[in-house]
Image (spheres, helix red, strand yellow):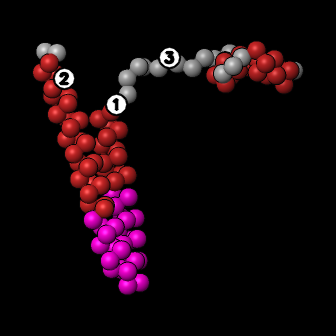
Amino acid sequence: MIFTELGQAVLNSTHAADVLAVVTGKTAPAPSGEINTDALISFFASKIAPILLAVLGIIFIGRASKGEVSKVLTSSAIAIIGLAFIAGAVSLFFVGTYLVNLAFK
């Protein structure tokens, strides 16, 4: 019985939420409409960035122990330039926010 209802719901619906609503009789709550971007940025800055930097450090130490110092220096320079670009993008984000607030005040 349940499999028949589930099969009919799948054939008549295009989204999994619609199928679950038909089978369980419950619908999902409406989305609030806002994403907390400040928390998202702080999460990436506090959790993801240090892990990526640690991985880069381990790779650099591994290469340096093999005697590939020139490759390590090149990779380090590229990583530092990449971090500078990221810092520039973040600063432009805040400058852009300031300019938009100034223009539409």
> How far apart in space, not on screen, are marks 3 and 2 (Cα)?
30 Å
User: Which percent across, then down, holds residue 36?
Assistant: 34, 30
Q: Nearer the viewer, residue 8 or 86?
A: 86
Residue 98 within the magenta-colored segment of the rendering: no
Disc 3 or 1, which lies upstream in sequence?
A: 3
Residue 60 within the magenta-colored segment of the rendering: yes
User: Which percent across, then down, holds residue 98?
Assistant: 15, 28
Disc 1 or 2, which lies upstream in sequence?
A: 1
For residue 66, which numbered disc appears in the image? Answer: none
Of discs 1 and 2, which sits in the foreground?
2
User: Which percent across, then down, holds residue 9?
Assistant: 76, 18
* Residue at 31% in and 61% down: 79
> What type is the residue that disc 3 sits on?
Ala
Quadrant in the picture for residue 100: top left
**Helix, strand or loop for disc 3:** loop
> What type is the residue that disc 1 sits on?
Asn
Which residue is disc 3 drawn over?
30
Q: Give the left or right position of residue 25, taking residue 54 as reference.
A: right
Give the answer, above or below, for where 11 lies relative to 44: above
- Name the quadrant of the N terminus: top right
Give the answer, above or below, for where 50 lies relative to 102: below
> What type is the residue that disc 2 sits on?
Val
Disc 3 or 2, which lies upstream in sequence?
A: 3
* Residue at 41% in and 84% down: 66
The kind of secondary structure the magenta stretch mainly shows is helix
Which residue is disc 2 drawn over?
100
Q: What segment is highlighted magenta in the picture?
A: 50-77
Dot 3, how many residues are within 10 Å of its Cα: few (below 14), some (14-19), or many (20+)? few
**Helix, strand or loop for disc 2:** helix
Which residue is disc 1 drawn over?
36
Dot 1, how many residues are within 10 Å of its Cα: few (below 14), some (14-19), or many (20+)? few
Give the answer, above or below, for where 65 lies relative to 60: below
